[in-house]
Image (cartoon, grey):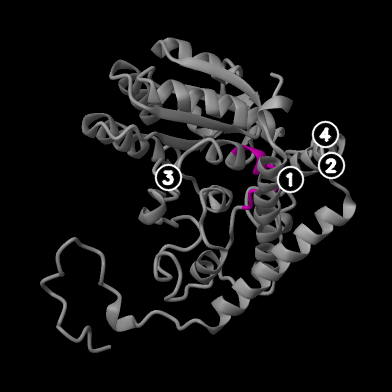
Amino acid sequence: MTVHSQVTKKQAVRFLQQMLRIRLFEERVIRLVNDNEIAGVTHEYIGQEAVAVGVCEALNEGDGITSTHRGHGHIIAKGGRVDRMMAELFGRKTGYNSGRGGSMHIADLSLNIYGANGMVAAGAPIAMGAAWAHKVKGTNQVAASFFGDGAINQGVLHETMNMASLWALPVLFVCENNGYAVTLSAEQSSANTRLAERASAYNMNGKLVDGMNVLEVFAEASEAVQLARAGGGPTFLECKTYRYMGHHTAESTMNLNYRSKQEINEWKKKDPIVQLDAWLRQYYDWDVADKQQLEEEIRAEIEAAVVYARQSPAPDPLESLHNMYATPYAGLPAKGWNL
């Protein structure tokens, strides 16, 4: 798809800024995990930035998303604040979920981020529910659900796709096909690896997209959003992409060999940030200094987020049962538990 005439310099620079913000945030998180400042493991989005940015830039502020265990990129691309994200990873009270959700469960209803989800494919019915509400209320809003290739064989996803198509709901099913569900390749888990073709079983529009090219993702997502708003129902986007890092930060210590260095390096040649930077230089007044300045500004923003997280207070144990229910928990004393 030709997208040169559809993207202005201002848009392209924003795409690059958002992809760099995701990349640099994730690289900083890895160092913090390795230094034991962030407990446990996290699932990095490095390499897949074009999918989150391309899709979220096609959405309006009022549109919603559901995310996955590998969700930092989605949250940032939808407008999430990196300081509150970092505080959440540190388990601090100022985090998006008051330090209770951690890496895999960040949500921000003010941005219509209905939550990252550690359960494979579990975000799909939530997004469909939001889309159903939008249609019933006539708000002209759209919902997008991100999920990996590992979700394609989950029954709940197919139930959701069937219902969304049957009711012509304004929802995007965004499959981030990075080739592996943890360590299991798509070839080993799916009888048909042309995942976008699954959409035809539900009379749904399906598109295969270069998930390493943010301009192509944006163009296809924009078309799908326009279709959804016009009452044309859902679209399934299979975005072929790749994660450069392991399934999670601890994988480097596990001596796994399901991928070769050659395979990883071949995919790095298609790096979405490098591609867009080169495209900007070709079509607009853009050079090395411009990208360096952008990087410096984002690095400073992320370091400020680290400081914010470090200085933020830890949650109060006496408030451990707060916000668990819509109404106050009857068994909770007025001043909390006497621990």
Residue 18 in picture, x, y percent from top left: 65, 50
Judged by depth in the image, the label closer to the viewer, 2 or 1, is 1
Judged by depth in the image, the label closer to the viewer, 3 or 4, is 4
Q: What residue range appears in magenta?
A: 44-51
Q: Amino acid at mark 1?
A: Tyr
Judged by depth in the image, the label closer to the viewer, 4 or 2, is 4
**Depth order, front residue of 220/86:** 220
Q: Amino acid at mark 4?
A: Tyr
Check the image and report above or below for 334 versus 197: below
Residue at position x 71%, y 34% in the image: 212
Q: Which residue is mark 3?
A: 119
Residue at position x 49%, y 33% in the image: 151
Secondary structure predominantly adopted by residues drawn in magenta: loop
CA gap between label 2 and label 1 equals 10 Å
Please give left or right for residue 321 compared with residue 329 in the image: right
Q: Which residue is mark 2?
A: 261
Q: Residue 119 sits in which quadrant?
A: top left
Q: Secondary structure at mark 1?
A: loop
Q: Within 10 angstroms of label 2, few (less than 14), some, or many (20 or more) residues?
A: few
Q: Residue 261 sits in which quadrant?
A: top right
Q: Which residue is mark 4?
A: 283
Please give left or right for residue 297 compared with residue 73 in the image: right
CA gap between label 2 and label 3 equals 29 Å
N-terminal-most mark, 2 or 1: 1
Residue 201 seen in the current view: yes
Please give left or right for residue 148 compared with residue 138 in the image: right
N-terminal-most mark, 4 or 1: 1
Q: Secondary structure at mark 4?
A: helix
Residue at position x 63%, y 74% in the image: 304
Is 246 included in the stretch rendered in magenta? no
- Residue 244: which disc? 1
CA gap between label 1 and label 3 equals 22 Å
